[in-house]
Image (cartoon, rainbow, N blue to C red):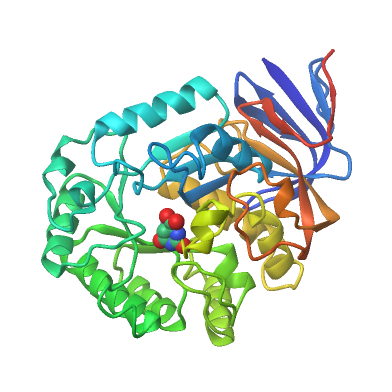
Amino acid sequence: MEVLIKNCRIVDETKDIQGDIYIKDGRIVEYGQSIHIDCKTIDATNLVAMPSFIDMHVHFREPGYTYKEDIYTGSMAALKGGYTFVNLMANTDPVCSGMEIVEYVLGRAKELDLIDIHQTVSVTKDFDGKTLDHLHTLDERVKFISDDGKGVQSNLTMFKALLIARDRDLTVIAHEEDEEIVDIDTRLSENIMTMRDIYLSGLTGARLHLAHVSTKESIEEIRKAKKEGIRVTCEVTPHHIALYDNDYRVNPPIREREDVRALVQGIVDGTVDVIATDHAPHSEEDKEKGAPGISGLETAFSLVYTNLVKRGSISLNRLSQLMSASPGKLMGLNKGRIKKGYDGDIVLIDLDKKIIIDKESFISKGKNTPFNGVEVYGEIIATIRRGQVKYNGGVNIDNR
Ligand code: DOR
Ligand code: ZN
């Protein structure tokens, strides 16, 4: 199986050149000026080719809440957003606390053959806040553990979980929310848990990845921790960058202008490692009842591109690093760069295309977005996984 992507602007974390990309047997074999090979050809004139995106924080709701999203609709939404890899969170029903659900999800992904998936396992069994025994039964397919959606409330449990994570080479993805404090002060609730976990990570030596960081204080703590050599990484969502002073319900909440400034500064200076969507689809009814979350996969790139690159805060290279190279590296994937030997996972984008976000056009079952009607730039035209076009929004293919 061979494919040649012709006449594109090739951008990844380190390069920005004009040329072609040749993919064979699912891997990138060559890229550069005027490659001539007689095979299936994709005309990418006037388009940018980037490594497809990798999302470290996604909720597909299967098993248990498939009326909100399932692995098929979620995967299709991911492809439309330019993603070929997602990391799924464990807050399904039942909670993903062992290999049985992991195997089910990975099996389903294989059967669908649309995107690649990693399934995170809960830190505490069934989110009970204390039981950790199941962590000893996980095999090497599991790299992350998280009680995302809830957070590990007990200091002792988190301390023990980090010790196990260190010994078993797992990374803890931390949802920082103190349940007792959150009702009176959501900022303090996030900050106090962030500080606790950075301290515990330093103490234990375990890898800690902070999910959806939203406050200026947390960013500053992470900056300091990194300087001290603590093994902490973090992600920021598109909505926490694009919005402030907005009460659309999401956890953590949309913050203030000063926080957005600090997040952008963190993105500019390297404190922030990754942009992750926290794609959290909900039904209209659940949303009316107060379910927190945003359906984010299909709007992520254009929001980040419009708010950060078009405004001049970061380069397209840095965006590629945040959305592909860094998450690829953190997850140990052979993806995220346009380089010989890497998976032929490419997204073709029309950067100049103006779009009005329309929730009714979402493939995701979750139409919950605060961005409906918002004008952005950058349309995903095609998403290619290991050389196969998995989403085609209007690119010409010569099959020969
Ligand atoms: O807004 C959110 N929605 N934040 C979370 O932490 C959980 C997520 C969900 O699962 O809906
Ligand atoms: Zn989440």
Of 265 and 245, which appears nearest the observer? Answer: 245
Figure label count: 0
* Rendering coords of residue 355 (x, y %): 82, 56
**Residue 211's image quarter?**
bottom left
* Rendering coords of residue 364 (x, y %): 61, 44
* Rendering coords of residue 138 (x, y %): 21, 36
* Rendering coords of residue 149 (x, y %): 36, 59
Quarter of the figure that contains the C terminus: top right
**Residue 26's image quarter?**
top right
Kindly identify the residue that appears in the image at 75 percent across and 57 percent down: 357
Kindly identify the residue that appears in the image at 70 percent across and 53 percent down: 359
Answer yes or no: is residue 235 visible. Answer: no
Of 75 and 322, which appears nearest the observer? Answer: 75
Of 265 and 152, which appears nearest the observer? Answer: 152
Query: Looking at the picture, does residue 386 appear above or below residue 236?
Result: above
Query: Looking at the picture, does residue 229 appear above or below residue 160?
Result: below
Query: Looking at the picture, does residue 376 appear above or below residue 32?
Result: below
Kindly identify the residue that appears in the image at 74 percent across and 46 percent down: 361
Decide if residue 56 is on the left or right side of residue 392.
left
Quarter of the figure that contains the N terminus: top right
Decide if residue 57 is on the left or right side of residue 238.
left
Query: Looking at the picture, does residue 324 appear above or below residue 191?
Result: above
Answer yes or no: is residue 382 visible. Answer: yes
